Amino acid sequence: MFNKKGGLTFDDILKSSWKLLHDGARNFRSPFHHAGLSTIDNNIPQSRMVILREFSEIDRTLLCHCDVRGPKVSQIQKNPHTSWLFYDPKKWLQLRLTGTASLHADDDLADSQWKEVKLHHRVNYCTGTAPGSPTEKPVSGLPDFLLDKTSHLLDEPSIRTNFAVIVCRFDEMDWLLLKLTGHIRARFRWENDRTEASWLIP
């Protein structure tokens, strides 16, 4: 991360951050593959873990999948402001990215993403009731037909209707490197095509 002269520049931070995020989207063993996604529900923050599916530094976008019936969908519809949290325990590095999210359920983006979802992962969209619905006992909510291992049924159009994509375009990144000799922190803000970077006290 530090350049050949032993220093650290804003460009160094951006390049290393983009590399980590790209790796997180491609490699399930990467610590950046899983991220905390926070939304707002009636002025109360709600956080959960999601899987980073795609990242673009050009568009400044992060992408994950979700069940269209889940509470985070309605939360984003009411308030699109979101925050993503990444942490690499080996590098002692934390990234926070904030911006606004959009939902995609019945468009080309959602269709193309659905084609990438493996059959054994499509089971996540097969529950008969919406995620977060109360139950009288601990159950998965999955229908009985899945117990027959008829995986071809996971291609049913009715399952596809439960699938959606969340795309977050971030306009701020908070970068924090933890060090025994003193932490280092930087913040980046984007407005249109302009990038503003500054060092912060951790």
Image (spheres, grey):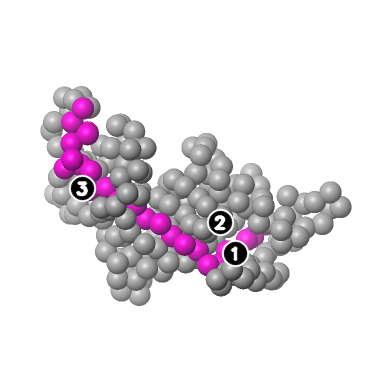
**Residue mark closest to the camera, 3 vs 1:** 3
Visible residue check, residue 88: no
Which residue type carries mark 3? Thr
Which label sits on residue 161?
3
The x and y percentages for residue 29 are 52, 36
First in residue order: circle 1 vs circle 2: 2
Which label sits on residue 174?
1
Asked whether residue 156 is drawn in magenta, I would say yes
Tell me which corner region of the image, top left, top right, bottom left or bottom right, holds residue 142: top left
Q: CA distance from mark 3 to mark 1?
A: 35 Å
Apparent side of residue 168 relative to residue 185 in the rendered image (left or right): left
Apparent side of residue 158 relative to residue 97 in the rendered image (left or right): left
Q: CA distance from mark 2 to mark 3?
A: 30 Å
Disc 1 crowd rating (10 Å Cα; few below 14, some 14-19, many 20+) is some
Q: Nearer the viewer, residue 194 or 173?
A: 194
Q: Residue furthest right?
A: 5
Which label sits on residue 17?
none
The x and y percentages for residue 123 are 25, 37
Q: CA distance from mark 1 to mark 2?
A: 18 Å
Q: Residue furthest bottom?
A: 43
The x and y percentages for residue 77 are 30, 67
Which residue type carries mark 2? Ile
First in residue order: circle 2 vs circle 3: 2
Give the residue pinned by disc 2: 58
Visible residue check, residue 69: yes
Which contiguous range is marked in magenta? 152-178
Asked whether residue 190 is drawn in magenta, I would say no
First in residue order: circle 3 vs circle 1: 3
Mark 2 secondary-structure assignment: loop
